[in-house]
Image (spheres, rainbow, N blue to C red):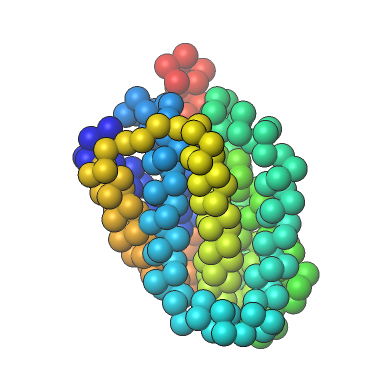
Amino acid sequence: MDWLEAMVLGIIQGLTEFLPISSTGHLYLGRHLFGLDDGGLFLDTVLHLGTLIAVLMVYRREVAAVIREPFSRMAKLLVVGTIPTVIIGLSFKDVFEEISETGVTIGWEFLVTGAVLWMADRWKQRGHKSLEKISYTDAIVVGTFQGTAILPAVSRSGMTIAAALYRRIDKETAAYFSFFLSIPAIAGALLFQLVDLATGRTYTLPLSSLMMATVMSTLFGYLAVRWMIRLLQRGSLRPFAVYVWGLGLLVLLFQWSGQF
């Protein structure tokens, strides 16, 4: 993989991790396009590192506050919201890995993501709960929706934002809680990948490519978080729904024709 391919994949990861269109699904398509179907674990690791750095940059003050007060209500909400994600991830890890490797359901998953986003756009008008009013039940629901994003073309940010809006959390808080909850999720995915790297289940890539991928995923991840926060305040999620519907239908068409 050369630095140009790494740059493109880094941009894809950074944008799609926080835009509600599925980073894993887009990376799967990107790697397929570049012929990188095998040995992508090391690349996935640095890409996740980049997006983790991005969200930590955006929420550095909030993260510092949680570290200073590990038993605060916000810290407890993060733990409660992360538990369902961990349970789903560990319980169905082998199944989801097989699905991710084959990509057989990726087109349908894009379609499901679009349907959820379309409904979420209707739910956002009724939100009224501020951060102080988020309950532990709300956190469990959002965390459960986040767990479904272990499927390759189901968007983590789309599912968590939709779940928050469904629970009548206001638009600004829904974006904040979704992205803040992504920190332990991305960190956990990164940890699992590091374990796999330590067991020798991958091969190394050129240092220049890894650095380019990390920088691009960090930069575009930071921009995506900032933009999504503003978009949810006054914009619509329906263009994202239309986009992933179109992408899903295109993938299904290529699969049906035997070209993918």
Q: Residue at x 35, y 25 (%)?
A: 35
The quarter of the picture where the C terminus appears is top left
Residue at image x 67%, y 84%?
A: 72
Indicate the position of residue 129 as horizontal and vertical percent values.
Answer: 66, 80
**Residue 81 locus on image (x, y percent):** 69, 65
Q: Which quadrant of the structure image shows residue 215? A: bottom left
Residue 153 visible in the snapshot: no
155 or 116: nearer the eye? 155
| Residue 151, image x, y percentages | 60, 41
Residue closest to the eye, 79 or 237: 79
Q: Quadrant of the N terminus?
A: top left
Residue 170 found in image quarter: bottom right
Residue at the spot x=65%, y=76% of the render?
Answer: 75
Q: Is residue 66 left or right of residue 219?
A: right
Horizontal arrangement in the rendering, residue 219 relative to residue 183 (left or right): left
Q: For this rendering, which residue is in front, 242 or 164?
A: 164
The answer to whether 9 appears left or right of 51 in the picture is: left
The residue most toward the top is 258
Q: Nearer the viewer, residue 234 or 137?
A: 137
Q: Residue furthest right?
A: 137
Q: Is residue 98 above or below residue 149?
A: above
Where's residue 217, x and y in %? 35, 54
- The tally of labels here is 0
Left or right of residue 254: residue 150? right
Which residue corresponds to the image point at 44% horizontal and 69% vertical from the top-left?
Answer: 56
Report whether residue 69 is seen.
yes
